[in-house]
Each structure stands twice: as C-alpha cells, then as structure tokens.
Amino acid sequence: MSHETRLTELEIRITEQDKIIEDLSGEIAEQWKVIDSLRTKLNALTTRFLELEEQTQPDIPVTRPPHW
C-alpha cells in the first residue's frame, strides 16, 4: 500500500468520523432540550402536588395525650 493511498484512506476516515461526531453532537443537543423540558414539567407537577397535598391535609386538633 502506497503512502498516498494510505493517506487518502485516513482522510476519508477522518471525514466520516467528523460527520458522525457532528451527528452525535446534534442528537445530544436535542436530548438536552427534551431533558430540560421534562425537568420543567416535573418541577411544576411537584409544586402542584405539594399545593394539593397541603389543601387536603385535615387540621390536627390540639388535644391532651390520653395518658394525662
């Protein structure tokens, strides 16, 4: 295998790897958008759940313990 052929093959590999890295980077960026959206929704649902939980808790009457 000549040096020129070997160099050409290496250049082709580098070009293909650059394309793969670019594609993967795009996928990761897209996934981060989804994760951020889900995190925002989870925080909103958590807040809403805690608000509803506070509204449904019965008032605890202040009484003396039975052993007094």
Image (tube, rainbow, N blue to C red):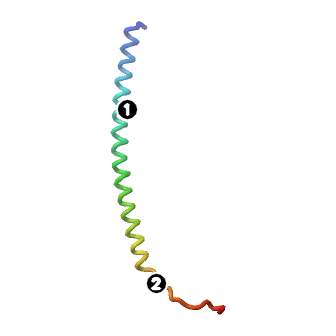
| Residue drawn where x is 36% and y is 18% of the image | 11
Badge 1 element: helix
Examine the rendered structure and indicate whether residue 12 appears above or below residue 36.
above
Of the residues under marks 1 and 2, which one precedes in the sequence? 1
Q: Is residue 22 left or right of residue 65?
A: left
**Residue most extreme to the right:** 67
Image quadrant containing the N terminus: top left
Examine the rendered structure and indicate whether residue 49 appears above or below residue 14.
below
| Residue drawn where x is 63% and y is 91% of the image | 66
Q: Residues within 10 Å of mark 2 (few under 14, many from 20)?
A: few
| Residue drawn where x is 42% and y is 71% of the image | 50
**How far apart in space, not on screen, are marks 1 and 2 (Cα)?**
57 Å
Q: Residues within 10 Å of mark 1 (few under 14, many from 20)?
A: few
Badge 2 element: loop
Q: Amino acid at mark 2?
A: Pro
Determine which quarter of the picture holds residue 3.
Answer: top left
Q: Position of residue 13 (x, y in %)?
A: 38, 22
Q: Amino acid at mark 1?
A: Ile
Q: Position of residue 31 (x, y in %)?
A: 36, 46
Q: How many marks?
A: 2
| Residue drawn where x is 51% and y is 89% of the image | 61
Write down the residue under mark 2: 58
Q: Is residue 8 left or right of residue 68?
A: left
